[in-house]
Image: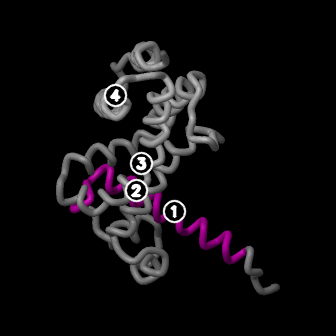
Amino acid sequence: MCPRSKEQYKKIRKIKRDLILNAALELFAENGFHNTTINSIAQKTSISNGLLYNYFESKEDLLKKIVSKGITEIITSFGNNQNDILTKDEFAHYIKENFNIIKNNLNFWRLYVAIIIQPPVLKIVKDEILNLSSPILKKLNNYFTTQGVKNPVAETKLFSSIMDGVSINYVIDSENFPLEDVINLITLKFCY
């Protein structure tokens, strides 16, 4: 049997890392951050506690990585817009794609909602959330500025608050929420 190459080790490491992240996400979403232990994550992944610490420094580090991964997915929904100026079509696409991401990853967004309503847990990831959200807010502010909105900062906050509120309501009751109708209303309101 030949020794493994660097690429094979990298691939194995990525698989293990993703396995740990997915197990932690599931357990955090089901049981809450404080009720989930490193031991329960290790058991779910069939990895020893010691090996788990080779991948992540702590339970807090795991939470930060999970949040970062989820928010990064939303950021990439802006597509390849490089100039920080969104067209109406790009903005409409962002609105729709944002909710598609939430629909396709409900576990993460349930965890996210739980995080933002628990001040001690939010404190762990608040800087991460704010840093990752900053480019999105900048693009939104630029969009509203180019659309001639009188107060683009307030419009950005209003839009973000509506998106957050809709997301929370959808996550809480996804089976009964008229998401497509709400997406259309948001698009009509903000795609001038």
Residue 133's disc number: 3
* Mark whose residue sits in front, 4 or 3: 4
Q: Which residue is mark 1?
A: 19
Q: Residues within 10 Å of mark 4 (few under 14, many from 20)?
A: few
Residue ID at (30%, 31%): 154
Q: Which residue is mark 2?
A: 131
Q: Secondary structure at mark 2?
A: helix
Extent of the magenta region: 8-35
Q: Name the residue type under label 2.
A: Asn
Number of marks in the rendered image:
4
Mark 3 and 2 residues: CB-CB less than 8 Å, in contact? Answer: yes
* Real-space CA distance between mark 4 and mark 3, rounded to the nearest whole angstrom: 20 Å
Residue 153's disc number: none
**Image coordinates for residue 98, horizontal then vertical, percent:** 48, 33
Sequence-wise, which precedes: disc 2 or disc 4?
A: 2
* Mark whose residue sits in front, 4 or 1: 4
Q: Secondary structure at mark 4?
A: loop
Answer above or below: position of 134 versus 6. Answer: above
Q: Which residue is mark 4?
A: 151
Q: Residues within 10 Å of mark 3 (few under 14, many from 20)?
A: some
Q: Name the residue type under label 1.
A: Leu
Residue ID at (63%, 39%): 81
Q: Name the residue type under label 4.
A: Asn
Q: Name the residue type under label 3.
A: Ser
Q: Secondary structure at mark 3?
A: helix
* Real-space CA distance between mark 4 and mark 1, rounded to the nearest whole angstrom: 45 Å
